[in-house]
Image (cartoon, rainbow, N blue to C red):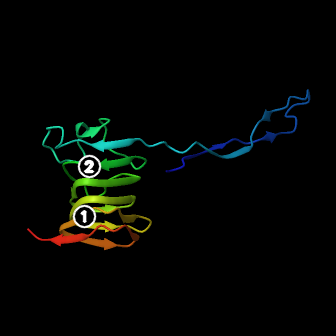
Amino acid sequence: MKTQSKTILATKTLLAPISKIGVWIIGVSWLIGAISAPPAMGATITYTGAAAGNFSSNWLVSTNWNPAKVPTEADDVIVGLGAVVLPPTPAFASLTLNGGKISGQFVSRGIIHWVSGTIGGQITIAAGGALELSGPDQKNLEEATINNAGTIRWDGSGGLQSSTA
């Protein structure tokens, strides 16, 4: 989750009288500082594209998601059915792959929870990002390369199978 900050700047100035009758110019100014807004709250968004009959695998089409919006970096994304092609820099806080397939050539800055399903293409786990493999189900790499600059954790008993077409 991201924290958004706003800075409010004001100054306080008290000047000496500018005339003999004692007119004072008073200006108010002080630094209130950085006021932090509450963290942006993300939604849980589920991919429905191919499963809903749209037959679109495009991550950037809002009607492929429930609720109907393209995921943002604050959202928790679930892919359980169908196949979705991720753009080069997909936005999500976390992506749970629990069946279905994700593919493309992309950089992940969030956390990918891989419970079951297939990953294809070329994935880069960026610094600060993570790929977590868990659970007893089979995980499939289909013509895939995973480049890791972040963290990869494996917790579970499921197998990992690699294949080429």
Residue to which mark 2 is pinned: 80
In the figure, 28 relative to 128: above or below? Answer: above
Which badge, 1 or 2, comes first in the chain's sequence?
2
Q: In this orientation, which residue lies closer to the viewer: 58 or 131?
A: 131
**Residue most extreme to the top:** 21
Quadrant holding the C terminus:
bottom left
The residue under the point 31% across, 57% down is 89
Residue type, label 2:
Gly
Q: Quadrant of residue 127?
A: bottom left
Q: Is residue 16 above or below residue 118?
A: above
Q: Which residue was labeled with disc 1?
A: 138
Q: Residue at x 79, y 41 (%)?
A: 13
Q: How many marks?
A: 2
Q: Where does the image place residue 27, in percent across and percent down from the top left?
A: 77, 35
Secondary structure state at the residue bearing disc 1: loop
Nearest the viewer among 133 and 158 is 158
Which one is closest to the eye, mark 1 or mark 2?
1
| Residue most extreme to the left | 165
Seen at 40% across and 46% down, the residue is: 75
- Residue 86 at least partly seen: no
Q: Nearer the viewer, residue 141 or 126?
A: 141
As shown in the figure, which amino acid type bears the numbered disc 1? Gln
Rendering quarter of residue 28: top right
Classify residue 100 as left or right of residue 11: left
**Spatial CA span between label 1 and label 2:** 14 Å
> What percent of the width, then of the height, locates residue 67?
32, 35
| Residue at image location 74% in from the left, 40% down from the top | 29
